[in-house]
Amino acid sequence: YVLKDNEFALDNVVASVRRVLSNRKTRVLVVDDVASARQVLVGLLEAQQYMVVEAASGLEAFAALEAYDDIEVVVTDHQMPDISGYELTRRIRRRFGSDRLRIIGVSSSSDRMLSASFLKAGASDFLYRPFVAEELQCRIANNVETLIQLKQLRAAAACDYLTGLYNRRYFYDLGPKLVNDCLRHKAASAVAILDIDHFKRLNDTYGHEIGDEVLKAVAGRLAAIFEGSDRLLSRLGGEEFAILFPMMDSIAATKLCDEIRSDISRLKVMADDEELSVTVSIGVAEISDHETFDNYLNAADQFLYMAKHKGRNQVYS
Ligand code: GH3
Ligand code: MG
Ligand code: MG
Ligand code: MG
Protein backbone atom coordinates (compact mmCIF):
# COMPACT_ATOMS: atom_id res chain seq x y z
CA TYR A 1 0.00 0.00 0.00
CA VAL A 2 2.98 2.25 0.46
CA LEU A 3 3.69 2.24 -3.23
CA LYS A 4 0.21 3.26 -4.31
CA ASP A 5 1.13 6.91 -3.89
CA ASN A 6 3.70 6.60 -6.60
CA GLU A 7 1.94 6.19 -9.85
CA PHE A 8 4.90 4.72 -11.65
CA ALA A 9 6.45 2.61 -8.94
CA LEU A 10 4.78 -0.61 -9.98
CA ASP A 11 4.94 0.22 -13.62
CA ASN A 12 7.59 -1.42 -15.68
CA VAL A 13 8.82 1.17 -18.16
CA VAL A 14 8.83 -1.28 -21.01
CA ALA A 15 5.25 -2.27 -20.25
CA SER A 16 4.14 1.34 -20.13
CA VAL A 17 5.79 2.12 -23.47
CA ARG A 18 4.02 -0.89 -24.94
CA ARG A 19 0.69 0.33 -23.59
CA VAL A 20 1.26 3.72 -25.13
CA LEU A 21 2.11 2.20 -28.48
CA SER A 22 -0.76 -0.28 -28.46
CA ASN A 23 -3.47 2.21 -29.47
CA ARG A 24 -5.36 1.73 -26.26
CA LYS A 25 -8.50 3.89 -26.39
CA THR A 26 -8.26 7.17 -24.51
CA ARG A 27 -10.89 7.86 -21.86
CA VAL A 28 -12.45 11.32 -21.98
CA LEU A 29 -14.63 12.96 -19.32
CA VAL A 30 -17.35 15.33 -20.55
CA VAL A 31 -18.65 17.82 -17.97
CA ASP A 32 -21.76 19.89 -18.74
CA ASP A 33 -24.90 20.59 -16.77
CA VAL A 34 -27.09 20.66 -19.90
CA ALA A 35 -27.86 17.14 -21.10
CA SER A 36 -28.34 18.10 -24.77
CA ALA A 37 -25.01 19.99 -24.87
CA ARG A 38 -23.34 16.97 -23.29
CA GLN A 39 -24.85 14.70 -25.92
CA VAL A 40 -23.34 16.75 -28.73
CA LEU A 41 -19.87 16.43 -27.19
CA VAL A 42 -20.32 12.72 -26.47
CA GLY A 43 -21.41 12.11 -30.07
CA LEU A 44 -18.35 13.90 -31.47
CA LEU A 45 -15.98 12.06 -29.13
CA GLU A 46 -17.47 8.64 -29.76
CA ALA A 47 -17.12 9.28 -33.47
CA GLN A 48 -13.38 9.62 -32.74
CA GLN A 49 -13.37 6.24 -30.95
CA TYR A 50 -12.78 7.65 -27.48
CA MET A 51 -14.32 6.04 -24.39
CA VAL A 52 -16.53 8.69 -22.86
CA VAL A 53 -17.62 9.27 -19.27
CA GLU A 54 -20.25 11.94 -18.50
CA ALA A 55 -20.69 14.27 -15.55
CA ALA A 56 -23.53 16.79 -15.08
CA SER A 57 -21.69 18.91 -12.50
CA GLY A 58 -18.30 19.69 -11.06
CA LEU A 59 -18.89 17.35 -8.15
CA GLU A 60 -19.87 14.55 -10.50
CA ALA A 61 -16.66 15.26 -12.41
CA PHE A 62 -14.56 14.74 -9.26
CA ALA A 63 -16.44 11.50 -8.56
CA ALA A 64 -15.73 10.31 -12.12
CA LEU A 65 -12.02 11.11 -11.73
CA GLU A 66 -12.04 9.01 -8.56
CA ALA A 67 -13.91 6.15 -10.21
CA TYR A 68 -11.75 6.02 -13.37
CA ASP A 69 -8.02 6.44 -12.89
CA ASP A 70 -7.40 6.38 -16.64
CA ILE A 71 -9.25 9.55 -17.66
CA GLU A 72 -6.75 11.53 -19.74
CA VAL A 73 -8.86 14.33 -21.21
CA VAL A 74 -11.55 16.47 -19.56
CA VAL A 75 -13.83 18.58 -21.74
CA THR A 76 -15.70 20.99 -19.49
CA ASP A 77 -18.39 23.59 -19.80
CA HIS A 78 -17.91 26.81 -17.80
CA GLN A 79 -21.29 27.82 -16.36
CA MET A 80 -22.61 25.13 -14.07
CA PRO A 81 -24.74 25.33 -10.91
CA ASP A 82 -22.26 23.95 -8.34
CA ILE A 83 -18.77 24.98 -9.36
CA SER A 84 -17.70 26.69 -12.57
CA GLY A 85 -15.61 24.99 -15.24
CA TYR A 86 -12.88 27.51 -14.44
CA GLU A 87 -12.85 26.46 -10.77
CA LEU A 88 -13.02 22.79 -11.75
CA THR A 89 -9.96 23.30 -13.96
CA ARG A 90 -8.05 24.95 -11.13
CA ARG A 91 -8.86 22.14 -8.72
CA ILE A 92 -8.08 19.32 -11.16
CA ARG A 93 -4.73 20.95 -11.92
CA ARG A 94 -3.75 20.80 -8.26
CA ARG A 95 -3.88 17.02 -8.52
CA PHE A 96 -2.98 16.24 -12.11
CA GLY A 97 -0.26 17.84 -14.19
CA SER A 98 -0.71 18.57 -17.89
CA ASP A 99 1.59 15.63 -18.63
CA ARG A 100 -1.08 13.36 -17.14
CA LEU A 101 -4.42 14.98 -17.94
CA ARG A 102 -5.49 17.47 -20.63
CA ILE A 103 -8.32 19.89 -19.89
CA ILE A 104 -10.31 21.59 -22.64
CA GLY A 105 -12.79 24.34 -21.73
CA VAL A 106 -15.89 25.13 -23.83
CA SER A 107 -18.31 27.95 -23.15
CA SER A 108 -21.03 30.02 -24.79
CA SER A 109 -20.07 33.00 -22.62
CA SER A 110 -19.61 36.33 -24.40
CA ASP A 111 -16.76 37.23 -22.03
CA ARG A 112 -13.72 37.32 -24.33
CA MET A 113 -11.37 37.09 -21.34
CA LEU A 114 -12.73 33.70 -20.32
CA SER A 115 -10.40 31.84 -22.68
CA ALA A 116 -7.30 33.42 -21.10
CA SER A 117 -8.65 32.73 -17.60
CA PHE A 118 -9.08 29.05 -18.41
CA LEU A 119 -5.59 28.78 -19.91
CA LYS A 120 -4.07 30.53 -16.88
CA ALA A 121 -5.92 28.13 -14.58
CA GLY A 122 -4.20 25.25 -16.34
CA ALA A 123 -6.54 24.37 -19.20
CA SER A 124 -4.70 22.93 -22.18
CA ASP A 125 -7.14 24.45 -24.65
CA PHE A 126 -10.37 26.46 -24.88
CA LEU A 127 -13.16 26.92 -27.45
CA TYR A 128 -16.08 29.34 -27.56
CA ARG A 129 -19.51 27.93 -28.38
CA PRO A 130 -20.88 27.49 -30.93
CA PHE A 131 -17.76 25.63 -32.09
CA VAL A 132 -17.08 23.94 -35.38
CA ALA A 133 -17.31 20.19 -34.70
CA GLU A 134 -14.19 19.40 -36.66
CA GLU A 135 -12.15 22.03 -34.85
CA LEU A 136 -13.09 20.54 -31.48
CA GLN A 137 -12.17 17.08 -32.74
CA CYS A 138 -8.81 18.30 -34.05
CA ARG A 139 -7.99 20.04 -30.80
CA ILE A 140 -8.82 16.93 -28.80
CA ALA A 141 -6.76 14.75 -31.13
CA ASN A 142 -3.81 17.16 -30.79
CA ASN A 143 -4.06 17.05 -27.01
CA VAL A 144 -4.16 13.25 -26.97
CA GLU A 145 -1.15 13.18 -29.30
CA THR A 146 0.78 15.53 -27.01
CA LEU A 147 -0.01 13.32 -24.05
CA ILE A 148 1.26 10.23 -25.85
CA GLN A 149 4.48 12.01 -26.80
CA LEU A 150 5.01 13.19 -23.22
CA LYS A 151 4.56 9.64 -21.96
CA GLN A 152 7.00 8.26 -24.50
CA LEU A 153 9.55 10.89 -23.50
CA ARG A 154 9.07 10.20 -19.82
CA ALA A 155 9.37 6.45 -20.35
CA ALA A 156 12.49 6.89 -22.50
CA ALA A 157 14.08 9.15 -19.88
CA ALA A 158 13.55 6.49 -17.20
CA CYS A 159 14.62 3.54 -19.30
CA ASP A 160 17.98 1.87 -19.87
CA TYR A 161 18.32 1.39 -23.61
CA LEU A 162 20.23 -1.92 -23.62
CA THR A 163 18.21 -3.86 -21.06
CA GLY A 164 14.84 -2.08 -20.92
CA LEU A 165 15.14 -1.83 -17.13
CA TYR A 166 14.77 1.43 -15.26
CA ASN A 167 17.97 3.47 -15.44
CA ARG A 168 20.08 5.10 -12.76
CA ARG A 169 18.29 8.44 -13.08
CA TYR A 170 14.91 6.87 -12.35
CA PHE A 171 16.30 4.80 -9.48
CA TYR A 172 17.72 7.89 -7.80
CA ASP A 173 14.53 9.80 -8.52
CA LEU A 174 12.01 7.33 -7.13
CA GLY A 175 14.19 5.45 -4.62
CA PRO A 176 14.38 8.19 -1.96
CA LYS A 177 10.61 8.74 -2.20
CA LEU A 178 9.89 5.05 -1.61
CA VAL A 179 12.35 4.95 1.28
CA ASN A 180 10.71 7.98 2.90
CA ASP A 181 7.25 6.43 2.54
CA CYS A 182 8.55 3.39 4.42
CA LEU A 183 10.24 5.48 7.10
CA ARG A 184 6.96 7.35 7.64
CA HIS A 185 5.38 3.97 8.36
CA LYS A 186 8.30 3.16 10.67
CA ALA A 187 9.38 0.37 8.35
CA ALA A 188 12.88 -0.42 7.15
CA SER A 189 13.88 -0.95 3.53
CA ALA A 190 16.93 -2.57 2.04
CA VAL A 191 19.01 -1.74 -0.98
CA ALA A 192 21.20 -4.16 -2.92
CA ILE A 193 23.88 -3.65 -5.53
CA LEU A 194 24.46 -6.61 -7.80
CA ASP A 195 27.57 -6.84 -9.95
CA ILE A 196 28.45 -9.50 -12.51
CA ASP A 197 31.68 -11.35 -11.65
CA HIS A 198 34.67 -11.14 -13.98
CA PHE A 199 32.63 -9.43 -16.65
CA LYS A 200 35.67 -7.81 -18.21
CA ARG A 201 37.18 -11.25 -18.76
CA LEU A 202 33.97 -12.35 -20.47
CA ASN A 203 34.08 -9.29 -22.75
CA ASP A 204 37.75 -9.88 -23.52
CA THR A 205 37.20 -13.55 -24.31
CA TYR A 206 33.98 -13.39 -26.31
CA GLY A 207 33.70 -9.75 -27.39
CA HIS A 208 31.40 -6.88 -26.40
CA GLU A 209 28.42 -8.15 -28.35
CA ILE A 210 28.33 -11.38 -26.38
CA GLY A 211 28.91 -9.27 -23.26
CA ASP A 212 25.79 -7.30 -24.17
CA GLU A 213 23.83 -10.53 -24.63
CA VAL A 214 24.87 -11.64 -21.14
CA LEU A 215 23.82 -8.27 -19.71
CA LYS A 216 20.43 -8.58 -21.39
CA ALA A 217 20.01 -12.16 -20.17
CA VAL A 218 20.83 -11.23 -16.56
CA ALA A 219 18.54 -8.17 -16.76
CA GLY A 220 15.75 -10.27 -18.25
CA ARG A 221 16.07 -12.83 -15.49
CA LEU A 222 15.98 -10.12 -12.81
CA ALA A 223 12.96 -8.48 -14.46
CA ALA A 224 11.15 -11.84 -14.47
CA ILE A 225 11.96 -12.42 -10.81
CA PHE A 226 10.62 -9.00 -9.79
CA GLU A 227 7.69 -8.73 -12.18
CA GLY A 228 4.57 -7.47 -10.43
CA SER A 229 6.39 -6.92 -7.12
CA ASP A 230 6.93 -3.62 -5.34
CA ARG A 231 10.72 -3.86 -5.67
CA LEU A 232 12.48 -1.20 -7.70
CA LEU A 233 14.99 -2.73 -10.09
CA SER A 234 17.39 -0.73 -12.23
CA ARG A 235 20.62 -0.93 -14.17
CA LEU A 236 22.97 1.54 -12.51
CA GLY A 237 25.45 1.29 -15.38
CA GLY A 238 27.92 -1.20 -16.86
CA GLU A 239 27.32 -4.62 -15.29
CA GLU A 240 25.88 -3.21 -12.08
CA PHE A 241 22.26 -3.36 -11.02
CA ALA A 242 20.50 -1.90 -7.99
CA ILE A 243 17.42 -3.26 -6.27
CA LEU A 244 15.39 -1.44 -3.64
CA PHE A 245 13.30 -3.63 -1.33
CA PRO A 246 10.68 -1.43 0.35
CA MET A 247 9.28 -2.59 3.70
CA MET A 248 11.95 -5.26 4.08
CA ASP A 249 14.80 -5.56 6.57
CA SER A 250 18.29 -6.56 5.55
CA ILE A 251 17.95 -10.17 6.83
CA ALA A 252 14.97 -10.88 4.58
CA ALA A 253 16.53 -8.99 1.65
CA THR A 254 19.80 -10.88 2.04
CA LYS A 255 17.95 -14.20 1.94
CA LEU A 256 16.12 -13.12 -1.21
CA CYS A 257 19.34 -11.89 -2.81
CA ASP A 258 20.96 -15.23 -2.18
CA GLU A 259 18.11 -16.93 -4.05
CA ILE A 260 18.65 -14.47 -6.90
CA ARG A 261 22.39 -15.16 -6.88
CA SER A 262 21.75 -18.89 -7.05
CA ASP A 263 19.12 -18.44 -9.78
CA ILE A 264 21.49 -16.44 -11.97
CA SER A 265 24.32 -18.91 -11.52
CA ARG A 266 22.05 -21.47 -13.22
CA LEU A 267 21.30 -19.17 -16.15
CA LYS A 268 22.66 -20.31 -19.52
CA VAL A 269 23.44 -17.78 -22.24
CA MET A 270 24.09 -18.99 -25.78
CA ALA A 271 27.22 -17.46 -27.32
CA ASP A 272 27.68 -18.75 -30.88
CA ASP A 273 27.40 -22.45 -30.07
CA GLU A 274 28.78 -22.29 -26.58
CA GLU A 275 26.73 -22.19 -23.39
CA LEU A 276 27.98 -19.48 -21.06
CA SER A 277 27.17 -19.11 -17.40
CA VAL A 278 27.81 -16.17 -15.08
CA THR A 279 27.85 -15.50 -11.40
CA VAL A 280 27.07 -12.33 -9.49
CA SER A 281 28.13 -10.79 -6.21
CA ILE A 282 25.66 -8.75 -4.17
CA GLY A 283 26.02 -6.23 -1.34
CA VAL A 284 22.95 -5.49 0.80
CA ALA A 285 22.43 -2.53 3.17
CA GLU A 286 19.50 -1.80 5.44
CA ILE A 287 17.80 1.60 5.37
CA SER A 288 16.24 2.35 8.73
CA ASP A 289 17.31 5.89 9.40
CA HIS A 290 17.21 9.26 7.65
CA GLU A 291 20.67 9.26 6.15
CA THR A 292 21.03 10.25 2.51
CA PHE A 293 20.09 7.73 -0.13
CA ASP A 294 23.65 7.95 -1.44
CA ASN A 295 25.03 6.88 1.93
CA TYR A 296 23.00 3.68 1.83
CA LEU A 297 24.11 2.96 -1.72
CA ASN A 298 27.69 3.50 -0.68
CA ALA A 299 27.18 1.05 2.19
CA ALA A 300 25.74 -1.54 -0.21
CA ASP A 301 28.71 -0.91 -2.51
CA GLN A 302 31.15 -1.56 0.33
CA PHE A 303 29.38 -4.81 1.17
CA LEU A 304 29.60 -5.69 -2.52
CA TYR A 305 33.33 -5.09 -2.35
CA MET A 306 33.49 -7.52 0.61
CA ALA A 307 31.54 -10.14 -1.36
CA LYS A 308 34.07 -9.79 -4.20
CA HIS A 309 36.98 -9.90 -1.78
CA LYS A 310 35.68 -13.08 -0.17
CA GLY A 311 35.67 -14.90 -3.48
CA ARG A 312 32.64 -13.66 -5.52
CA ASN A 313 29.35 -15.51 -6.27
CA GLN A 314 28.05 -14.52 -2.84
CA VAL A 315 25.94 -12.05 -0.91
CA TYR A 316 27.38 -9.86 1.84
CA SER A 317 25.44 -7.62 4.22
P1 GH3 B 1 34.59 -8.02 -10.78
O1 GH3 B 1 34.28 -9.47 -10.64
O2 GH3 B 1 35.53 -7.53 -9.75
O3 GH3 B 1 33.33 -7.20 -10.81
O4 GH3 B 1 35.30 -7.83 -12.18
P2 GH3 B 1 34.72 -7.24 -13.51
O5 GH3 B 1 35.60 -7.62 -14.63
O6 GH3 B 1 33.30 -7.62 -13.65
O7 GH3 B 1 34.72 -5.68 -13.19
P3 GH3 B 1 35.27 -4.43 -13.97
O8 GH3 B 1 34.58 -3.27 -13.33
O9 GH3 B 1 36.77 -4.44 -14.01
O10 GH3 B 1 34.75 -4.61 -15.45
C1 GH3 B 1 33.51 -4.23 -15.87
C2 GH3 B 1 33.51 -4.30 -17.36
O11 GH3 B 1 32.19 -4.09 -17.87
C3 GH3 B 1 34.36 -3.26 -18.01
C4 GH3 B 1 33.54 -2.74 -19.18
O12 GH3 B 1 34.24 -2.87 -20.39
C5 GH3 B 1 32.35 -3.63 -19.20
N1 GH3 B 1 31.12 -2.96 -19.60
C6 GH3 B 1 30.54 -1.85 -19.05
N2 GH3 B 1 29.41 -1.55 -19.68
C7 GH3 B 1 29.24 -2.47 -20.66
C8 GH3 B 1 28.23 -2.70 -21.68
O13 GH3 B 1 27.24 -1.96 -21.80
N3 GH3 B 1 28.39 -3.75 -22.51
C9 GH3 B 1 29.48 -4.60 -22.40
N4 GH3 B 1 29.56 -5.63 -23.24
N5 GH3 B 1 30.44 -4.40 -21.48
C10 GH3 B 1 30.32 -3.37 -20.62
MG1 MG C 1 -23.58 25.17 -18.43
MG1 MG D 1 31.41 -3.34 -11.69
MG1 MG E 1 31.91 -6.92 -12.23
Image (cartoon, grey):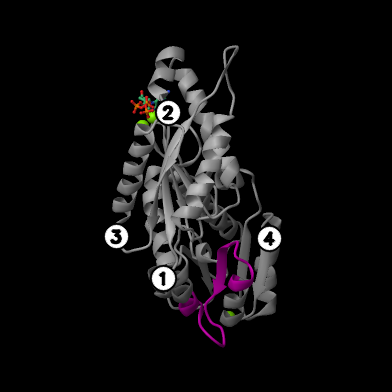
* Alpha-carbon span between mark 2 and mark 3: 29 Å
Q: Which residues are magenta?
A: 65-88
Q: Earlier in the sequence, mark 1 or mark 4?
A: 4
Foreground tag (1 vs 2): 2
Q: Is residue 156 above or below residue 63?
A: above
Residue behind label 4 places its C-beta within 8 angstroms of ligand 2 = no
The answer to whether marks 1 and 4 mark residues whose Cβ atoms lie closer than 8 Å is no
Real-space Cα separation, disc 3 to disc 1, in angstroms: 14 Å
Is label 2's Cβ within 8 Å of ligand 1?
yes
Question: Which of the two discs, 4 and 3, sits closer to the camera?
Answer: 3
Q: Is residue 85 magenta?
A: yes
Q: Secondary structure at mark 2?
A: loop
> Which residue, given by chain and number where applicable, does mark 2 sit on?
197
Choose the circle earlier in sequence order: 2 or 3: 2
Residue 205 percent across, percent down from the top left:
43, 13
At x 57% / y 12%, what residue is drawn? 272
- Please identify the quadrant where the N terminus is shown: bottom right
- Residue drawn where x is 56% and y is 83% of the image: 80
Instruction: Give the label on residue 51, or none.
Output: 4
Q: Of the two numbered discs 1 and 2 on the same chain, state the one appearing first in sequence.
A: 1
On the image, numbered disc 1 is attached to which residue?
184
Judge depth for marks 2 and 3 and give the one in front: 2
- Residue that mark 3 sits on: 291
- Disc 3 residue type? Glu
Q: Describe residue 310's horizontal placement relative to residue 102 as left or right.
A: left
Q: Position of residue 274 (x, y in %)?
A: 58, 13
Residue 40, visible in the rendered structure: yes
Q: Looking at the image, is 174 positioned above or below residue 185?
A: above
